[in-house]
Amino acid sequence: MIDIKDLSVIYNQEIVALNHIDLALKENQCTVIIGKNGSGKSTLLQTLVGIIEFQGNIYIDNISLDKNHLIDIRQKVGLVFQNPDHQLFMSTIYDDLDFGLINQGLSKEDIKQRIDDIAKELNIENLLYRSCHKLSGGQKRMVAIACVLVMKPDIILLDEPTSFLDPGSRRQIINVLKSLHKTVIIASHDLDMALDIADEVVLLNDGKVIEQGDTNHILIDQELLEGNGLELPYRYQR
């Protein structure tokens, strides 16, 4: 359970990125946050792992998100950044995957098993000993997702997880996310993906929550979407 109360984020004392948001996000369901560019989607995700300073209160599984509990929160919550280059920094992909697991204190045998399992699941076995600098955008995206999933966090945040992906890889990621029995929160422009995966949708605009509720109800509301700078999912367009 993520409970957000009166959350605001203000950059440079003048740019309001999030404006007095109240949200309750249920555990073990998938929530997709939608909104036009600049609506506050990425800021919200980064705030939930303590990267961005904020005003208000955030509780994750009844733990307050503050300096005293930041380590506890980051053990529970994993974030896949919109730009994979912000996440990949070791000499090989295997090293990127095993970095966090070493810090968790896992044995070499357990680390290898986890990496083998996630590599097979995401079809990245052939990338493990390559440098991230030699990967395509889509390959980097898959590896960045693997780096978070391999840690087995309770809550998974993903910022535009289907960007850069070809149709086959996009479908693979959707299937993987659908199979997770965890709390998943996704920020995305991909409204067709939201239809496939989301239990509920949160619509942001200008840093405010415009609507929260049933996926199918929100994503067929052409007037609501267009009034907030979005279009209907492709499957509903004529």
Image (spheres, rainbow, N blue to C red):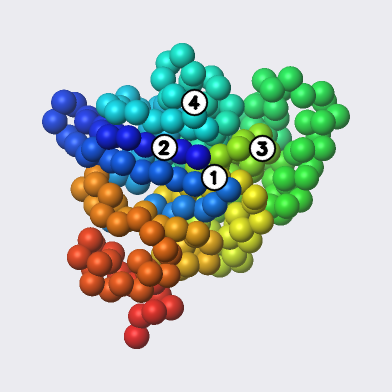
As helix, strand or loop, the secondary structure at mark 1 comes to loop
**Type of residue at label 4?**
Ile
- Residue at mark 2 to residue at mark 4: CA–CA distance: 10 Å
Q: Which mark is residue 27?
A: 1
Left or right of 19? Residue 231 is right
Pick the quarter of the image with the C terminus. Answer: bottom left
What residue is drawn where x is 22% and y is 30%? 11
- Viewer-nearest of discs 4 and 3: 4
Visible in this render: residue 39? Answer: no
Tell me whether circle 4 and circle 3 mark residues in contact (CB < 8 Å): no
Tell me whether circle 2 and circle 4 mark residues in contact (CB < 8 Å): no
Left or right of 131? Residue 11 is left
- Residue at mark 3 to residue at mark 1: CA–CA distance: 15 Å
- Viewer-nearest of discs 3 and 1: 1
Report which residue position mark 2 lands on: 3
Q: Indicate the position of residue 2 as horizontal and vertical percent values.
A: 46, 38
Structural crowding at the residue carrying mark 3, measured as other residues with C-alpha within 10 Å and reported as few (<14), some (14–19) or many (≥20): some
Of mark 2 and mark 3, the one earlier in the sequence is 2
Q: Indicate the position of residue 140 as horizontal and vertical percent values.
A: 56, 46
Q: Which mark is residue 152?
A: 3
**Type of residue at label 3?**
Lys
Q: Nearer the viewer, residue 149 or 98?
A: 149
Q: Nearer the viewer, residue 62 or 164?
A: 62
**Type of residue at label 2?**
Asp
What residue is drawn where x is 82% and y is 25%? 108
Structural crowding at the residue carrying mark 1, measured as other residues with C-alpha within 10 Å and reported as few (<14), some (14–19) or many (≥20): some
Q: Indicate the position of residue 205 as horizontal and vertical percent values.
A: 24, 52
Report which residue position mark 4 lands on: 63
Tell me whether circle 1 and circle 2 mark residues in contact (CB < 8 Å): no
- Residue at mark 1 to residue at mark 4: CA–CA distance: 14 Å
As helix, strand or loop, the secondary structure at mark 4 comes to strand
Q: Nearer the viewer, residue 176 or 115?
A: 176
